[in-house]
Image (tube, rainbow, N blue to C red):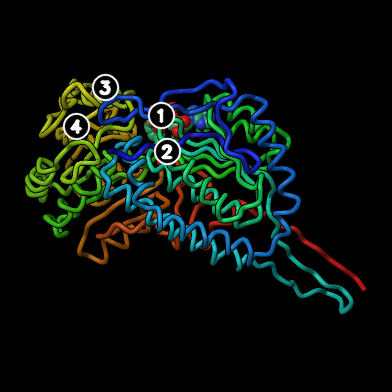
Amino acid sequence: MSLPYEDLSLYIDGEFVTGGGRREQDVHDPSTGSVIGRLPHATPADLDRALGAAQRAFETWRTVSPLEKSRILRRVAELTRERVQAIARNITLDQGKPLAEAVSEVTRCADHCDWHAEECRRIYGRVIPARFPNVRQFVLREPVGVCAAFTPWNFPYNQAIRKIAAAVGAGCTIVLKGPEDTPSAVVAIARMFHEAGLPPGVLNVVWGVPAEVSKHLIESPIVRKVSFTGSVPVGKQLAAMAGAHMKRVTMELGGHSPVIVCEDADIERAADMLSTLKFANAGQVCVSPNRMYVHEKAFDRFMARFIEATKKIKVGPGLEADTRMGPLAHARRLPAMAEMVEDATDRGARIETGGARIGDRGYFWAPTVLTNVPDEARIMNHEPFGPVVPCVPFRDLDDALRRANSLPYGLSSYAFTNSTKHALKIQNGIQAGLVNINHFGQGLPETPFGGIKDSGIGSEGGTETFDGYLVTKFVTQMD
Ligand code: NAD
């Protein structure tokens, strides 16, 4: 007998809420298209109740000792490790990624909780030496207040836990709208915080029509901070709305990560590593290596190996043991892929492998490699957010850096070279918040993660993780 899918609900003021005639939406298994759950939408009254609960809870949560906050975050880490298999299975069911990838996502999130549990005990202020002997000057770092957070469907557990752990650890309270397409992970997180003893109202989870929920929450005078992970256009809309009400923002937005493979690199190793990373989570990753610039003298060698490695990727339902790439997370990504490929081929691109949907059940798209792609093609300028990648040659490193930096985005970037001179030039010259050279190592709890240019504002993770959730208060005192 198969296990049931997550029992979906809202979580408001410490209660799991369903029914009551609320509007509901279907949740689908992207490997079959069949309905696996029904998700209740928050009414406007539910949103106000969540905001009121978060406001009340803030008055006490902000004064709770870091030790107690740390205890709760550690307990959630433990519960996550105990439940990793069940949570991961549900992520594979609603999001589609292979089970091994879902297990890895959830396991890493336990580490995120531990990191925040440790770091929240080190939110220090400072003492500034005064100009007079009877004056004392302090800098205090205080929680910003009630936060509204919006998280996407590609890493449903990871994106949510980063915002929740940072807000809760800093002493803020939070109303989070999770991804309606892939809700199981966020409900599982709410259950674990509930069981770990988080006081009612500190975390609230709501669902609904994204534009309606975000407008309601961001415009509320109760909310002092907005945190969003998702696409650049939506991020700009939400940041503008937050700006109109003078609210702080953290924006983790899309990118279009360039890859530079130098002639002196280990070409076969680079091709194998890039094929694995590019098609992880079916390419639906904000830091996916998306534009391959390969030195013209190494281009043919790289392509032969990259295409060979890509052709070996077994596509199938995420719960099948030998699956290396699952379906796209929802039906609307299929036409998005088709349009990108068609635009490129209309402009002269060649399909080296893939290029089309697989079957007509579920949302499977074949891993796709394009060559001979002109710089004007849509896929060279807009994030594909799927398993399609263009590969083009470059003449010298200046040419590669110019093309890599030519877009308004600046999230991640990749380079392969065995020359320290080239590595230094790339490290200093690339316009990106994340630079991976001969190695993929971003998104760890202890390292900061965030973009520059249109890719966002602020960092999550690292010792920077609480910065967006704190305000600075200066106190000067005379005897
Ligand atoms: P989309 O732009 O409609 O939605 C992206 C995400 O933003 C979803 O989670 C959605 O629920 C949310 N969203 C949309 N409008 C919103 C609003 N007004 N208020 C609050 N939240 C809102 O696109 P999509 O088809 O769901 O996803 C495809 C695009 O999303 C891709 O092009 C990709 O760039 C982007 N995306 C980025 C990330 C990331 O990690 N940066 C994650 C998922 C999706």
Task: Give the residue at mark 3.
Answer: 339
Q: Residue furthest front?
A: 1
Pointer 3 local density, CA inside 10 Å: few below 14, some 14–19, many at least 20: some
Q: Does 377 sit left or right of 226 as displayed?
A: left
Q: Amino acid at mark 3?
A: Glu
Q: Amino acid at mark 4?
A: Val
Q: Nearer the viewer, residue 115 or 36?
A: 36
Q: Nearer the viewer, mark 1 or mark 4?
A: 1
Q: Are marks 1 and 2 in contact (CB under 8 Å)?
A: yes
Return the disc, 1 or 4, that comes first in the chain's sequence: 1
Marks 1 and 4, how far apart at CA = 41 Å
Task: Give the residue at mark 2.
Answer: 6
Q: Nearer the viewer, mark 2 or mark 3?
A: 2
Q: Does 237 sit left or right of 129 as displayed?
A: left
Q: Secondary structure at mark 1?
A: strand
Quadrant (top left, top right, bottom left, bottom right) of the N terminus: top left
Q: Amino acid at mark 1?
A: Gly
Q: Is residue 408 visible?
A: no
Residue 206, located in which quarter of the rendered image? Answer: top right
